[in-house]
Amino acid sequence: MKTDNTIKLKDGRMLGFAEYGSQNGKPVINLGSSPECSKRLPCLR
């Protein structure tokens, strides 16, 4: 399964995301364009 989606944020910016793989699989989150993400998300520390 693959889907590409966008969401319009409250400030007018668009957030794009994609979903790949089996719906029964384990989730993997990739925040590749945000070098500061690990400082803000405790689960990635």
Image (tube, rainbow, N blue to C red):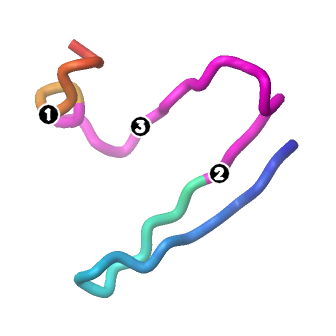
Tell me which segment is drawn in magenta.
18-37
Question: Considering the numbered disc 2 on the image, is that residue within a helix, a strand or a loop?
Answer: strand
Q: CA distance from mark 3 to mark 2?
A: 13 Å
Q: CA distance from mark 2 to mark 1?
A: 22 Å
The single residue placed furthest to the top in the displayed view is 45
Q: Residue at x 44, y 67 (%)?
A: 15
Q: Which mark is residue 40?
A: 1
Label 3 crowd bin: few (<14), some (14–19), many (20+), radius 10 Å: few
- Residue at mark 3: 32
- Residue at mark 2: 18
The single residue placed furthest to the front in the displayed view is 24
Earlier sequence position, callout 1 versus callout 3: 3
Q: Is residue 17 magenta?
A: no
Amino acid type at circle 3 is: Gly
Q: Are marks 3 and 2 in contact (CB under 8 Å)?
A: no
Which quadrant holds the N terminus? top right
Which quadrant holds the C terminus? top left
Question: Considering the numbered disc 3 on the image, is that residue within a helix, a strand or a loop?
Answer: loop
Left or right of 6? Residue 12 is left
